[in-house]
Amino acid sequence: MSDFFLNTVLTLDASVRVCVPLIFASMAGLFAERSGVVDIGLEGKLLMSAFIAASAAAVFGSPWIGLLAGIFASAVLAMIHGFASITYKGNQIVSGVAINILASGLTMILSLAWFKKAGITPTLKNYQRFLSIDLPGLDFMDHIPILGVIYRELISGHNVLVYVALQLCLWFGGSSIGLDLVFA
């Protein structure tokens, strides 16, 4: 097998893993846009959610608690954005930019106060993070020259959030039919 093929598969594998937070944020932006709210603050929500999730997972030792804490942090920022732009009819762009600035500064201050490291959460141990899942048939597929590498590196071996994000793309991202059912 050529190095070029293996490097291509490993690059695609890394791209799939890294794009998961962007998929979740873009789905949130899609729902916000369909409800009539321009959500420029997605980056701030993403940053705050990641920081709170990593912090909670480090403190409580559970990736599930970290995930719930991250969702909660993002929901709180979404409610602030909705309160400013819907209740008080404020400018949605200004509110979103303010959330981005708030999250950028707040994560730095909180990490310095909580962990004595500016902008860095503690390194998570294996029991504090979602581990990769090996899909069935991995031993059988390893014997097939090209498909085995693609199955092992690209399809199998991701954590549960990767598969949830890809399923969300199939449900809602493929067409607007899924969103039309939700917003009907």
Image (cartoon, helix red, strand yellow):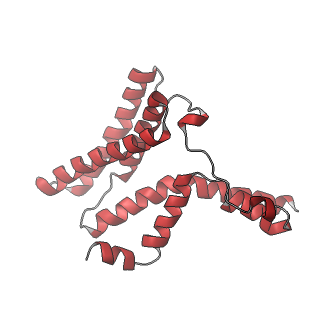
The picture quadrant where one finds residue 32 is bottom left
> In what quadrant of the picture does the N terminus appear?
bottom right
Q: Position of residue 169 (x, y in %)?
A: 48, 68
Residue 119 makes an appearance in the image = no
Tell me which corner region of the image, top left, top right, bottom left or bottom right, holds residue 155. bottom right
The residue located at (44%, 39%) in the rendering is: 66
Relative to 58, residue 158 above or below:
below
Q: Quadrant of the C terminus?
A: bottom left
Residue 129: x %, y % from top left: 55, 40
Q: Nearer the viewer, residue 94 or 150?
A: 150
* In this view, 117 is above or below 104: above
Q: Residue at x 52, y 53 (%)?
A: 161
Residue 122 versus residue 147 in the image, above or below = above
- Farthest right residue? 1
Instruction: Please report the residue visible at 38 percent of the width from the left and 75 percent of the height from the top.
Output: 178
Q: Report whether residue 140 is seen.
A: yes
Find residue 101 and report its image quarter. top left
Instruction: State the residue in front, 62 or 55.
Output: 62
Q: Closest to the observer: 22 or 144? A: 144
